Image (cartoon, grey):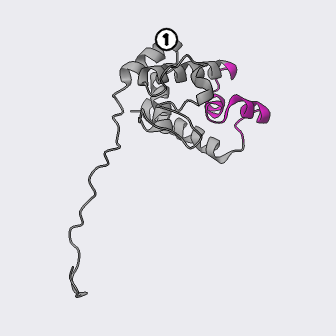
């Protein structure tokens, strides 16, 4: 380490790429299968997975949500998921849930997304996106990611 203040840094090393980066295409076959089975947009599913878990199949949230689509433990059995960390099962279960939310909210995507994040009880209570910063940000992030994917 130089002791004089006359030295200047010309090249600064960049940190090695994180080993936690996950491929955004690795699960496309599962997403395609779930999209076709449940009639939910492939690109919407990718946007949700991107925001929920950043394509990390082993993701666990502070609230206990699991896997790629961050499914809460109480919904694991409900959606017939044996292993929430199995990408195929997680995507199929999460897509089924999203389909049901889209039906419940008459295809209104922002409401379905808010319900996916905060639960349908909160969306029903406020008759719209609840005034919860996390949920409002979640809806914005998914919509932004979805729009980027659509316009590629």
Q: Position of residue 47 (x, y in %)?
A: 47, 32
The relative height of residue 86 versus residue 134 in the rendered view (above or below) is above
Magenta stretch: includes residue 119: yes
Q: Position of residue 55 (x, y in %)?
A: 41, 35
Left or right? Give the position of 12 relative to 67: left
The C terminus sits in image quarter:
top left
For the point 21% across and 79% down, which residue is it?
Answer: 1
How busy is the neighbourhood of tag 1: few (under 14 within 10 Å), some, or many (20 plus)? few
User: In this figure, which residue is indicated by the disc labeled 1?
Assistant: 37
The relative height of residue 21 versus residue 39 in the rendered view (above or below) is below
Which region of the structure is painted magenta?
104-130
For the point 43% across and 35% down, which residue is it?
Answer: 58
Q: Main secondary structure of the magenta part?
A: helix
Quadrant hosting residue 77: top right
**Which element type, helix, strand or loop, lies under badge 1?**
helix
Left or right? Give the position of 103 relative to 24: right
């Amino acid at each position: 380490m130089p002791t004089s203040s006359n030295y200047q840094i010309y090249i600064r090393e960049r940190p090695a790429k994180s080993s936690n980066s996950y491929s955004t295409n690795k699960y496309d076959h599962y997403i395609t299968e779930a999209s076709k089975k449940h009639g939910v947009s492939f690109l919407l599913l990718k946007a949700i997975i991107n925001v929920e878990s950043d394509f990390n199949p082993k993701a666990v949230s502070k609230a206990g949500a699991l896997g790629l689509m961050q499914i809460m433990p109480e919904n694991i059995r409900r959606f017939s998921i044996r292993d929430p960390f199995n990408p195929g099962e997680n995507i199929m279960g999460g897509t089924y849930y999203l389909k049901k939310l889209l039906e419940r909210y008459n295809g209104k995507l922002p409401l379905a997304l808010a319900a996916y994040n905060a639960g349908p009880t909160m969306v029903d209570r406020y008759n719209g996106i609840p005034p919860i910063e996390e949920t409002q940000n979640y809806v914005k992030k998914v919509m932004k990611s979805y729009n980027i994917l659509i316009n590629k």
